[in-house]
Amino acid sequence: MINPRQHSSDLVFWDVDTQFDFMTPPEQGGRLYVRDPQDDTDEGAIQIAPVLERLSEYARTHDVLRVATGDWHVLEHREIDPEDPDFRTTYPPHCMAGEVGATKIPETALRDPLLLPLGADPGMAWDITRRAVREGRDIFVQKEEFSCFVGNPATDALLQALAPQAIVVYGVALDVCVKYAVEGFLDRGLTVLIVKDATWGLGLEDRETLLAEWERRGAVRITSEQVLNGELPIVPPPIH
């Protein structure tokens, strides 16, 4: 089993985009709520909020370092199309820099977070990581693309500095930004544990097909109960 040490980066929780605009139904102000628009029965990402809250509380009480990524857009970003978005490669304005929609939901609020901003360089990423581990703080990574590695290239240096034994991944959307994160980790030879009941998708790709492909490459599906009970498996290195 993997046992986190106090203020260690051996085990990292990686929270993908649990921001107001993605996690909040439109009638409550969310501008790009994560749900399958082709499925009238899909209540969307709000359903996983209680699970996310329990994971956040576990991280706080067990001194697990959390890295949260978040869209931080301006209208000029490639992903943003106010006029004719295709809802695959482009979307209406959402998570705009400095606005409420870009803030994290209360259930995933970070612990005195350090910021890795857009335009950060590798040196800043290393400095932030050292401070986060030393001071027991979380990290918020701003990004301008689906992929945190493209949307904030300093993410690579951040991961090198963290050098985690395993990354526990959860958040939204499973078939967009979570996908880019998981596949980026696997490409880099990292051990990935996906909390299957703490993710939600847009219905762009079949959930089981995605999870099976990531498992084939070495990722492991786990449940929030396994996390909360400290039952994280030791897994072999991923297949490239």
Image (cartoon, rainbow, N blue to C red):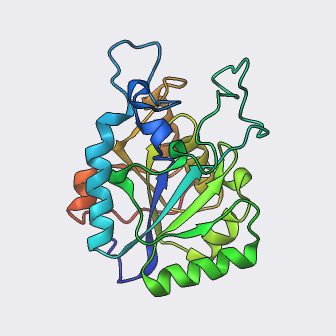
Q: In the picture provided, is 45 more to the left or to the right than 32?
A: left
Q: Residue furthest front?
A: 99
Q: In this view, does 2 lie above or below 19?
A: below
Q: Which residue lies furthest to the bottom in this view?
A: 134
The percent coordinates of residue 232 (x first, y second) are 31, 63
Q: In the picture provided, is 76 more to the left or to the right than 112?
A: right
* Residue displayed at 34% across by 71% down: 2
Q: In this view, does 31 lie above or below 159?
A: above
Front residue of this view, candidates 20 and 192: 20
Quarter of the picture containing the N terminus is: bottom left
The percent coordinates of residue 30 (x first, y second) are 46, 32
* Residue displayed at 35% across by 52% down: 106
* Residue displayed at 49% across by 37% down: 21
The percent coordinates of residue 209 (x first, y second) are 48, 30
Can residue 223 be seen here? The reply is: no
Picture quadrant of residue 189: bottom right
The percent coordinates of residue 234 (x first, y second) are 37, 66
Q: In the picture provided, is 20 more to the left or to the right than 5?
A: right
